[in-house]
Amino acid sequence: MNTIPLPIAEPPSRSQRAKPPANKHEADKLAKRLRHQVGRAIADFGMIEDGDRVMVCLSGGKDSYTLLDVLLQLQKKAPVKFSITAVNLDQKQPGFPEHVLPDYLTSIGVDFHIIEQDTYSVVSRVIPEGKTMCSLCSRLRRGALYTYAEEHGFTKIALGHHRDDLVNTFFLNLFFHAKLSGMPPKLLSDDGKHVVIRPLAYVREDDIEAYAEAKRFPIIPCNLCGSQENLQRKQVKKMLAQWEKDAPGRIETMARALGDIRPSQLSDPKLFDFMALGKRGDDALPDAHAWLAGGETQRDDD
Ligand code: SF4
């Protein structure tokens, strides 16, 4: 598919977007906001129930660290009992610091497992040099994690996608795939075997950045392998960052719109029965072919 030009401008610099909390009071407020938003998302979408075994996919990025951290806090006071296991896939990218996650996870005392699978060699063999590898890399990662979840009886797979990811994906699908569709907070995997949850669905990326800095998570950058992310995704991110700069709060407005859909005000006859709307008789209505070919009905003035 061709890349369509979008209004692009450089996104605001890192310092304009998120600042770590200035003092303990601010840090506590941020932590409380995150717990509140995650708790609300879990409740709104029925993400976790009593007896669930939740596998938290941990990449070493700010999002998944934040997800794990907030879920562990909520677990202590949750109205249901559920277990948490952090799982990382070591894809054997060059330079991956394999001790960082085990050290951190051991220090916080959470149950964890590192899967070792050299998907990096596969990706670098299959994708021509200079092309983005992220899409295949993510697909292989997802496959390995889902297989592990199935083999070990996890009932929920928790991913660290946040509010801004949900909005980005919506616009990617809108601009490049002609679909009104996004990244849902909860979904059943294509093979029907896994329930995937995104408890950070209401959380702003800026807040996650600030939280990750305040908590000093040992971040492992995803681009160690040197691959660039998909150009279309980059374009959409820049566009949204510019919109947010021009009109602060716009991303939040759009995120709220994703949860307030009116099928009768859109144009998809699969979602709303436009045929039945105002129909007077029981006869089947002529289809498009009949309209184009001309009907048999004679008008009085013929
Ligand atoms: S940057 Fe590298 S490791 Fe990260 S998703 Fe892309 S290909 Fe995979």
Image (spheres, grey):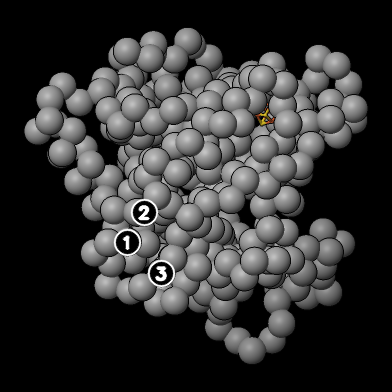
Q: Is residue 203 above or below residue 214?
A: below
Q: Is residue 200 left or right of residue 97?
A: left
Q: What residue is rendered at 48% in x and 36% in y?
A: 103
- Where disc 2 sits, the SS reads helix
Q: What residue is rendered at 49% in x and 11% in y?
A: 9
Across and down, in percent, residue 231 comes to 67, 22
Residue tagged 3: 82
Residue closest to the eye, 248 or 68? 68
Q: In this view, does 108 lie to the left or right of 185?
A: left
Q: What is the three-letter code of the residue carrying label 3?
A: Phe
Q: What is the three-letter code of the residue carrying label 1?
A: Gln
Residue tagged 1: 75
Q: What residue is rendered at 60% in x and 36% in y?
A: 172
Residue tagged 2: 71
Across and down, in percent, residue 155 comes to 55, 69
Quadrant into which the N terminus falls: top right
CB contact under 8 Å: marks 1 and 2? yes
CB contact under 8 Å: marks 3 and 1? yes
Q: Residue furthest bottom?
A: 282
Q: Is residue 246 above or below residue 261?
A: above
Q: How many labels does the image show?
A: 3
- Where disc 1 sits, the SS reads helix
